Structures are given as structure tokens and as C-alpha cells.
Amino acid sequence: MDTHFTYTLDDLGKTEFEGTPLAVIGHPIRHSVSPAMHNAAIAKLREQDTRFIDWAYYRFDIAPADFTEAVSLFYKHNFLGLNLTIPHKVQAMDLIYGVSPDGERMGAVNTLVWGEHGYDGFNTDGYGLKNALKTDLGVTLNGATVILLGSGGAARAAAVQCILDGCAKLYVGNRSVERLEQLMSVIKAMPGGDCAEAFALAEPPSDLPDQGVLVNATSLGLKTEDPAPFDVAHLPKGWAVYDMIYNPDATRLLQEARACGLPAANGLSMLVHQGARSLEIWSHAEVDAHTMMRAACRALNLPPRLG
Ligand code: NDP
């Protein structure tokens, strides 16, 4: 089996994935760096413990219409774990047997684990963000003021994590008011959720404290010509900026933040930490995030950096 290849639904019936297979499923998926990250971390685990001798992580392009059939085939073929990415994280909620409290609140799962009765679902995106903010920017969510941009799946995971970790104030802004209101109703229903406040993108929050973090969870910035989703000139000098986008390496938002002297980081560390947590859930072993970060940088042709 080739861990660099992109497999399809057809291959699930025709090909034998021996040993302990894992996979990332998405559509599109060809550019995912998850196989590189996970196979590097698995190789490291294998050096310490022979039970990982036959573990391998594959990549599958599965269209939304084929997702239900694919999940039952992955289960039948004993795939121990699946990572789900765009656009499958929400649809999976209807196909799993059990769901973690985080996954339930976030309304989406990105990690499935083979269980006796079916796959169980977890969401490691919030964990990934929390660790990335700490590692890259020295920001702890507890007691922090956060401005969150977006109301899609990634924003919902981020908002839930902010509330779970006890942020002092959470401002959420989004282009579509309807989606923003849906997210706010989920957050407000959580214990501690009354610190959340919606804002219109054209009227950013004022009277901000000296320190805080702005998190971009919109897809504005994925194209190099995209404008920044927020004018960082509104932020006090003690603020930090995190963009969940990692490709391109520096979005307009990050460029403008750095030009203003604000610490800023891209979403690669979030990707690495959510992946490390998934592998920990499957393996019950401690996973080295630095190994994953090195592999992700190699796969993206970026200079090595710490994870
Ligand atoms: P969704 O499609 O669920 O949400 C997209 C969000 O972007 C919505 O809030 C949408 O607003 C907003 N948006 C899209 N286009 C525009 C625009 N032109 N102007 C303003 N807002 C816009 O995507 P996800 O939540 O899954 O992902 C969001 C981003 O986070 C993506 O860039 C993704 O790559 C990144 N991500 C990174 C991860 C990591 O590990 N680093 C993990 C998960 C996601 P509206 O509601 O108005 O449409």
C-alpha cells in the first residue's frame, strides 16, 4: 500500500489494507499534509513500541454522496481511526455510535475511532487551537479576551473551546448574520456562555483591554488576493493575531498584523496539534507534535519550525 497515494471509494472494495489502517477522508483531499504528519509520528511511535509495527495512515477522496457508504466500508475493513475534513465533519454526526461531549457541543467530529458497535466521534479542533495559541503566541484562553471571526465549523469549535476554557470575553463577528445567530445560540446555552457577544464586521468592538487575541476562522485569505477580514488597526498593541489558514503561509491579515508589530501566527500549529490529539486517541500513547510539525513543513516545502 502507498501512503502517498490518494485512494477512492472503489479502492475500499478492491484493495486489502492490512495491519492497522487509519485514514483522512475529505473532498478535495489531494493536498492534505495529514498523511505525512501522521506517518512520521507513527514511525516515531514504532521506534519505542512494536505494537505500532503495522500502523499506516492513508488518504481517501470521498464525495459527500458516497460518505455514508464509505464509513460503513471503512468500518467493515477495520480502519481503526478516521480523520474527517471538509465537507464531512457535520454529516458524520448522523453515522456515529457515540460522540464525545466536545463533539456534541461543536456539532461536528473530525476523529472517528472504531468501536464494537460502530465508530465513536471526537472533535480535536478546539484542542488544536488552544495548544496552537499557547505554543505560537503564549496565549492562554482562560481569562482572555478573544475576537473570533467566522461562524462555520471551525469557528464553532473555537468558540466552544473559548467558553470551555473560561475566556473572560468572546466577541464573534461573521458575514452572514443568520449563521452568526445560530452560533451565538449554541454558545449562549453553554455554562459561561454569557460572556459571548455578537458584533457586525462593519462595527468592530471598541474599548478593548490592552491584551487579547484575534482569531480568524473564516476562509477569507485562502486566496492570495483576498483582503484581510478585519482591520488590525482597531487592536491595541498588546494583542496577538492567529489565522487558522496555513496555506498561504502568510495571509493579508497576518502580513498587516506583523506590519503593526503584533505577534501573529498561522494555522499550521492548530493542524499539527489536532492531528497529534487524534493519534493519541487512537494509540493511547504520547505523540510527538514536533515530529508532526517537521513532517508538515517538509510536505509544504516550508522551512522547519517548532510545533
Ligand atoms: P466553513 O465553510 O464552515 O465556514 C466558512 C466561514 O468563512 C464562514 O464564517 C463564512 O461566512 C466565512 N467566509 C467565507 N467567505 C467569506 C468572505 N468572502 N468574506 C467573509 N467571510 C467569509 O469553513 P470552516 O469553518 O470549516 O473553515 C474556516 C477556515 O478555517 C478555512 O480557511 C479552513 O481552511 C480553516 N481551518 C483550519 C484548520 C486548522 O487546523 N488550521 C481546521 C479547520 C479549518 P458566512 O457564514 O457568511 O458564509
Image (cartoon, grey):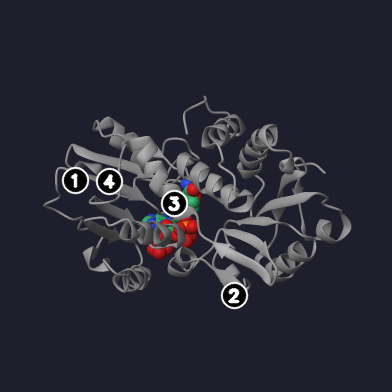
Query: Mark 1 highlights which residue?
Result: 234
Question: Which one is in front in this view, the residue at disc 4 or the one at disc 3?
Answer: 3
Density class for disc 2 (Cα within 10 Å; few <14, some 14-19, many ≥20) is few
Residue 182 x, y percent position in the rendering = 36, 73
- Going from N to C along the chain, the mark reached first, 4 or 3, is 3
Q: Which residue is the site of mark 3?
A: 127
Q: Secondary structure at mark 2?
A: helix
Q: Is mark 1 within 8 Å of ligand 1?
A: no
Q: Nearer the viewer, mark 1 or mark 4?
A: 4
- Pointer 4 and pointer 2: residues touching (CB < 8 Å)? no
The three-letter code of the residue at mark 3 reads Tyr
Check disc 2 and report the residue beneath it: 94
Q: Which mark is residue 213?
A: 4
Q: Is residue 237 above or below residue 76?
A: above
Q: Depth check: give the residue in front, 2 or 126.
A: 126
Quick check: 283 left or right of 3?
Answer: left
Q: Is residue 258 above or below residue 64?
A: above
Q: Position of residue 241 (x, y in %)?
A: 31, 42
Residue type indicated by callout 2: Asp
- Quadrant containing the N terminus is top right
Residue at horizontal 74 percent and vertical 51 percent from the top: 21
Position of residue 117 relative to residue 249, above or below, is below
- If you read the primary sequence from the N terminus, does the residue marked by circle 1 or circle 4 appear first? 4
Dividing the picture into quadrants, the one containing residue 200 is bottom left
* SS for callout 3: helix
Whole-Å distance between the Cαs marked 1 and 4? Answer: 12 Å
